Amino acid sequence: MTSLDAFAESKLAQLEQHALRRALTVTTRTDGAMVYRGGRQFVSFSCNDYLGLSQHPHVKAAALAAIETYGTGAGASRLVTGNHPLLVELEARLAKLKQAPAARVFGSGYLTNLGVIPALAGEGDLILADELSHACIFAGSQLSAATLLTFRHNDAEHAEDILKAERGKYRNVLLITETVFSMDGDRAPLAALAGICAAHDVWLMSDDAHGLGVLAPGDVRAPLQMGTLSKVLGSYGGYLCASLPVVDLMTSRARTVVYSTGLPPAAAAAAIAALDIIAADPALTARPLTKARAFTQRLGLPDAQSPIVPLVLGSAEAALEASRLLQDEGFLVVAIRPPTVAEGSARLRFAFSAAHSDADVARLADVVTTRLDMRVQA
Ligand SMILES: *Cc1c(COP(=O)(O)O)cnc(C)c1O
């Protein structure tokens, strides 16, 4: 065996030992909340396509029309020949929705944070992030030469304590949080954080990957609002909404804009069509949260704050076992394990969608009560 393969094998063996080895399972989705895996059909509670827009006939038609007219790829970075008019239109639409002066789209949400954060913070600066922030917020922070500190999850007082002690040592400070936490489903205290940022001359950045189109935006708008086209909008890509100079700076300094190919025209067209549907159908956008609340009520849990509901089970093995039990009952709820979540907080993460029927949700809650509670106690 080569040393390379021996390296990979030993890493895999370690992961296996801790129930942390991951595997890909071929899965198809063609309609609503149904997924097909290994010849079986499941109702999925693990898709972030909260409004089912990736399957919506208007969204699909927009993508197909863009491909027919413009082809499949952008051909180059936007700074070369990849600046398609559909991207310009999409950016105008996103900026309007976010009540921001301008927007810039990126290859994905992950690439947005990898591009934006190092363009704003560098040596001599501080990045202060919620400890439960998404992996790409930490990756972007590490790519910058700035100092990275974390504050306790959703604890604005702790963030302020850190700023009181540390602010003076740094030139600029960027505070980053998520509007809706991807693995916990709870919401950031944005108003409190915005107040603290204003008091200490700190730049607030919010990651709205799981909020856009499913939760009413709060009154507080961070000066840096990023998000993804890949979840509620059913497409692919990411964005930053901000002031004109900040967005303009990204055009020259965000490496994931400068050195990466522009979004395919179809991804932009699909996202624009999805934004049209969201604007036209408030009843649709309210549905995922209503379903999540029906679930939490049936289980006697605190009211869901978003379409994401976690059921923390502790060990990775317990989460995998619970996921298998639900699969036996026809539900796909993928186990979330470290390092995606903290050690000892492996969980099932339920993502509710407008495509779920009330009967799906009721049966899921019943199965969780009867089968999982027994296992958790056993
Ligand atoms: C999914 C997610 C991202 C990354 O978005 P992609 O478009 O999937 O790359 C960023 N931040 C948060 C909070 C997310 O949940």
Image: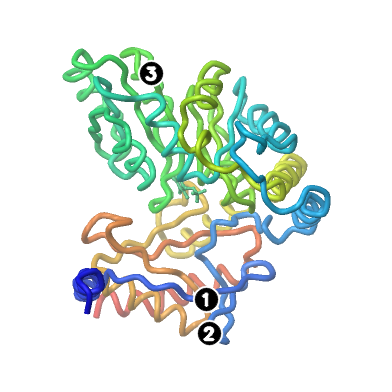
Q: Earlier in the sequence, mark 1 or mark 3?
A: 1
Separation (CA) of disc 3 from disc 2: 51 Å
Per the image, the residue denoted by label 1 is: 26
Q: Residue at x 48, y 26 (%)?
A: 224
Per the image, the residue denoted by label 2 is: 38
Label 1 sits on what residue type? Answer: Val
Q: Secondary structure at mark 1?
A: loop
Separation (CA) of disc 2 from disc 1: 8 Å
Q: Earlier in the sequence, mark 3 or mark 2?
A: 2
Residue 48 in view here = yes
Q: Disc 1, disc 3: CB below 8 Å? A: no
- Decide if ligand 1 comes within 8 Å of the CB at mark 1: no
Q: Secondary structure at mark 3?
A: helix
Q: Is residue 42 above or below residue 261?
A: below
Residue at the front extreme of this rendering = 2
Lateral position of residue 148 relative to residue 190, left or right: left
Label 2 sits on what residue type? Answer: Gly
- Observer-side mark, 3 or 2, equals 2
Instruction: Locate residue 176: give its quadrant.
Output: top left
Per the image, the residue denoted by label 3 is: 195
Q: Disc 2, disc 1: CB below 8 Å? A: yes
Residue at the left extreme of this rendering = 165
Name the residue nearer the viewer: 357 or 115.
Answer: 115
Q: Residue at x 27, y 28 (%)?
A: 146
Please state the horizontal and vertical placement of residue 137, each as a whole percent of the image.
37, 40
Separation (CA) of disc 1 from disc 3: 46 Å
Q: Is residue 46 above or below residue 86?
A: below
- Colouring used for the render: rainbow
Q: Residue at x 72, y 42 (%)?
A: 272
Label 3 sits on what residue type? Answer: Gly
Please state the horizontal and vertical placement of residue 68, each as a whole percent of the image.
82, 54
Decide: few, some or many residues near mark 2? Use Cα within 10 Å; few <14, some 14-19, many ≥20.
few
